[in-house]
């Protein structure tokens, strides 16, 4: 198995970085070699792994514009089997700089070709926009993972994203597919939650993850300690939910036998 998955949604605050950090950390614990690529100028995935930004010598910005090779910029995290291509606020300038460069759509893809065989999973944490930087991720990826909230406006955003994916598939990346749609900050007590889930499942059927990520204080606290939730509180609801998601990504068919996972919103 060797897969590049872009974690993408043009809306902010939907759990892209949280998913990148926690899914990556769980798969690392399952003895999968993982690279997390942070191309968001907020650098939340970078800080989520406890990387001190002042100590970073090269970032995804320098890699995208060609100042350094990706092998020079990737650094190990302190967590098992997980490396990271870090990001800082400098990434905010990439959008303008990329417009001046040849093959601007393929910059990330070309760099990842140099190292993809070293990893079983590469996760790309995308910025909250359908920008040139995000398009680089879509061109480089095999599949996309879409975290989304159960809100009406999220449905509109999902439609826009799918149209962009169709365009990228037609022009630049013919094999791009949807890994899955992931409901985050999930609260099954709300009517709108169930309405949105029903509508998404009707349209996307087997492209919706069965795992739901609940609202969980431990998931919110863990980044302030520079830790994935599974290292911060192994048996919190957030950790168990991302364990369930990890098993789905790995194709484990027995994931729903654990009643503890069903109790946090995992659908049978």
Image (cartoon, helix red, strand yellow):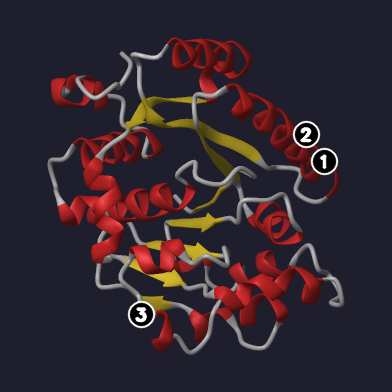
Quarter of the figure that contains the C terminus: top left
Label 1, label 2: how far apart the Cα atoms are:
6 Å
Label 3 or label 1, whichever lies nearer to me, is: 3
| Left or right: 186 as drawn, with respect to 125 | left
Q: Secondary structure at mark 2?
A: helix
- Res. 143 image quadrant: top right
The residue singled out by tag 3 in the image is 52
Question: Which residue is pictured at 60% across the width and 56% down the height?
Answer: 127
Residue 212 in picture, x, y percent from top left: 36, 27
Disc 2 + disc 3, Cβ < 8 Å: no
| Left or right: 264 as drawn, with respect to 20 | left
- Res. 70 image quadrant: bottom right
Disc 1 + disc 2, Cβ < 8 Å: yes
Q: Is residue 181 above or below residue 1?
A: above
Q: Secondary structure at mark 3?
A: loop
Question: Which residue is pictured at 80% across the width and 72% down the height?
Answer: 96
Q: Nearer the viewer, residue 19 or 112?
A: 19
| Left or right: 28 as drawn, with respect to 54 | left
The residue singled out by tag 1 in the image is 167
Label 3, label 1: how far apart the Cα atoms are:
37 Å
Residue 173 in picture, x, y percent from top left: 75, 48
The residue singled out by tag 2 in the image is 163
């Amino acid at each position: 198995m060797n897969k590049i998955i872009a974690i993408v949604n043009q809306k902010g605050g939907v759990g892209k970085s949280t998913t990148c950090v926690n899914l990556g950390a769980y798969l690392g614990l399952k003895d999968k070699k993982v690279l997390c690529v942070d191309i968001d100028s907020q650098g939340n995935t970078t800080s989520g792994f406890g990387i001190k930004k002042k100590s970073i010598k090269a970032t995804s910005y320098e890699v995208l514009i060609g100042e350094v090779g990706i092998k020079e910029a990737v650094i190990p995290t302190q967590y098992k089997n997980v490396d990271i291509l870090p990001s800082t606020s400098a990434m905010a300038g990439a959008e303008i700089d990329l417009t001046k460069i040849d093959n601007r759509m393929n910059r990330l893809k070309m760099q990842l070709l140099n190292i993809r065989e070293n990893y079983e999973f590469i996760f790309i944490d995308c910025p909250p926009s359908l920008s040139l930087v995000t398009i680089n991720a879509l061109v480089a990826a095999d599949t996309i993972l879409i975290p989304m909230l159960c809100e009406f406006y999220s449905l509109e955003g999902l439609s826009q994203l799918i149209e962009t994916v169709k365009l990228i598939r037609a022009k630049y990346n013919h094999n791009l597919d949807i890994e899955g749609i992931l409901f985050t900050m999930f609260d099954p007590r709300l009517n709108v939650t169930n309405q949105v889930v029903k509508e998404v499942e009707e349209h996307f059927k087997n492209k919706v993850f069965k795992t739901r990520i609940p609202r969980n204080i431990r998931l919110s606290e863990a980044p302030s300690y520079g830790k994935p939730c599974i290292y911060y509180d192994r048996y919190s609801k957030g950790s168990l939910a991302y364990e369930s998601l990890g098993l789905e990504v790995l194709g484990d068919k027995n994931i729903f036998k654990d009643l503890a996972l069903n109790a946090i919103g995992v659908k049978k």
